[in-house]
Image (spheres, rainbow, N blue to C red):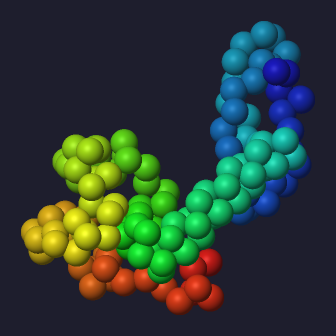
Amino acid sequence: MDKKDVPQDNSATYQGQKKLIYAVDESGHYQGVTSTGWEVESFATQMAVDELQQQSDEALIKAQNGEVSSLAYHMLRLRFDLVSLAQTTGFFQWQIKRHLTPKVFAKLSDKKLAIYGDVMKMTIAELKSLPNHNDSTN
């Protein structure tokens, strides 16, 4: 991409920040150029954020209905998946899958809950609780 073609669409997803992009200058050398974003990237980012929010909302409803543990909701709300949560907690993925079931989660030791809490920056009480439906957008 030529330096003069770097998009400057003032993307809302950048929240006033700029992104460094490498583009070709007049002499054919790569040079860093800041961009305020572009429409296509903003649209794709917003779609991904909306999808994650929908998954989080669905997990909250399932947790409120007792189909999954509150850990399932908090995991998705904080943008973790099984792989990233396993990597950060040190638990195996199969262990986390078990912890997503309400019966198993209810019997977890405070030591194991503290590991989740440390990673998610939550207290054990917060980890065990669920927001009211109106609070789930936070």
Using the image, determine if residue 122 lies above or below residue 87: below
Using the image, determine if residue 4 lies above or below residue 49: above
Using the image, determine if residue 113 lies above or below residue 31: below
Residue 114 visible, this angle: no
Q: Where is the N terminus found, in terms of image quarters?
A: top right
Q: Where is the C terminus found, in terms of image quarters?
A: bottom right
| Closest to the observer, 41 or 14 | 41
Residue 136: quarter of image: bottom right
Q: Is residue 87 left or right of residue 33?
A: left
Q: Is residue 89 left or right of residue 76?
A: left
Q: In this view, does 118 lie to the left or right of 30?
A: left
Q: Extreme top residue here?
A: 28
Q: What x and y, as percent, mark residue 66?
A: 42, 76
Residue 29: quarter of image: top right
Q: What x and y, as percent, mark residue 103?
A: 26, 70
Q: What x and y, as percent, mark residue 70?
A: 38, 73
| Closest to the observer, 102 or 2 | 102
Determine the residue positioned at 69% across, 26% down: 22
Determine the residue positioned at 43% across, 54% down: 80
Determine the residue positioned at 16% across, 72% down: 107
Q: What x and y, as percent, mark residue 122?
A: 31, 75
Count of labels shown?
0
| Closest to the observer, 105 or 16 | 105
Using the image, determine if residue 19 lies above or below residue 49: above
Determine the residue positioned at 84% across, 54% down: 10
| Closest to the observer, 125 or 7 | 125
Residue 32 visible, this angle: yes
Q: Is residue 32 left or right of residue 100?
A: right
